[in-house]
Amino acid sequence: MLMTLDLATMLSLSAVLTGMAAALLLATWRAAGRPDWLAAWAGFCSLGALATLLYAQRGRVPEPLLTFGATPLYALGWALFWAGARRLRGAGLAWPWVLLPPLLWVLACAGLPPLRAHAELRAALRRDLVRRPAAARRAGGAAAARQSRAAPRCARARPADPAARPRPAGPRRARPGRPARSPSAASSSWPPP
């Protein structure tokens, strides 16, 4: 006997896994000193899980809740993913660009009744809202790669001697169950056995 799963079950399972990824990212964010890019990626997973749960309830919840609730949440989640990637690279971030995709979606669906009535048109708009920023990211990434290749190779190389690498000042943080080591003890035990 072949067991089959319906779409709602698959989407619910996907939402649970995405929620677990959000929890792991939040735990990592807290342990890593609260970098903002990890918080943005945790927000991406959280909003994606919530939007997927709403999509799993299609047929049980009103269609406007999916159109004006789930899809803007999903678009905002992807915008947070993009924002986190920019922050990870050290690039600046303009918050209006993060809020633009969900805002465009709501304005298009509220202002154009034919778009609200036809799922195919909404799918095309949703695809374009994701595809256009992705193409811009690829173009920006290609420019950054060209700039990186233009830098001399020796400027990017790490020092060959491990003792030449700068070490943080002060005692190292102790791991649970291990005593803290001083910087002198850390440098005297290099290389590790």
Image (tube, helix red, strand yellow):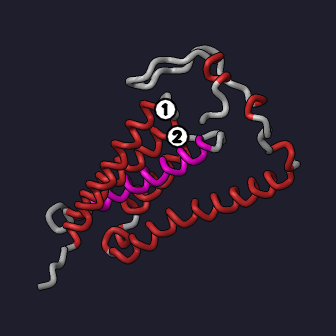
Which residue corresponds to mark 2? Answer: 37
Q: Is residue 70 left or right of residue 75?
A: left
- Residue 11 within the segment the image draws in magenta: no
Pick whichever of labels 1 and 2 is earlier in the sequence: 1
Q: Nearer the viewer, mark 1 or mark 2?
A: 1
SS class of the residue under badge 1?
loop
Task: Report whether 4 appears left or right of 96.
Answer: left
Determine the residue positioned at 42% across, 31% down. 30
Q: Amino acid at mark 2?
A: Trp
Tag of residue 83: none
Q: Residue at x 19, y 66 (%)?
A: 9
Is most of the magenta stretch helix, strand or loop? helix
Residue at the spot 54% in from the left edge and 46% down from the top edge: 83
Q: Quadrant of residue 29?
A: top left
The extreme bottom residue here reads 1
All told, the count of numbered labels is 2
| Tag 1 residue | 32
| Residues rendered magenta in the picture | 64-88
Figure quadrant of the N terminus: bottom left
Percent x, y for residue 148? 79, 51
Quadrant in the picture for the C terminus: top right
**Which element carries disc 2, helix, strand or loop?**
helix
Q: Are marks 1 and 2 in contact (CB under 8 Å)?
A: no
- Judge whether residue 147 can be spotted in this image: yes
Report if residue 71 lies within the magenta region.
Answer: yes
Measured as percent of width and height from the top left, residue 128 is found at 51, 68
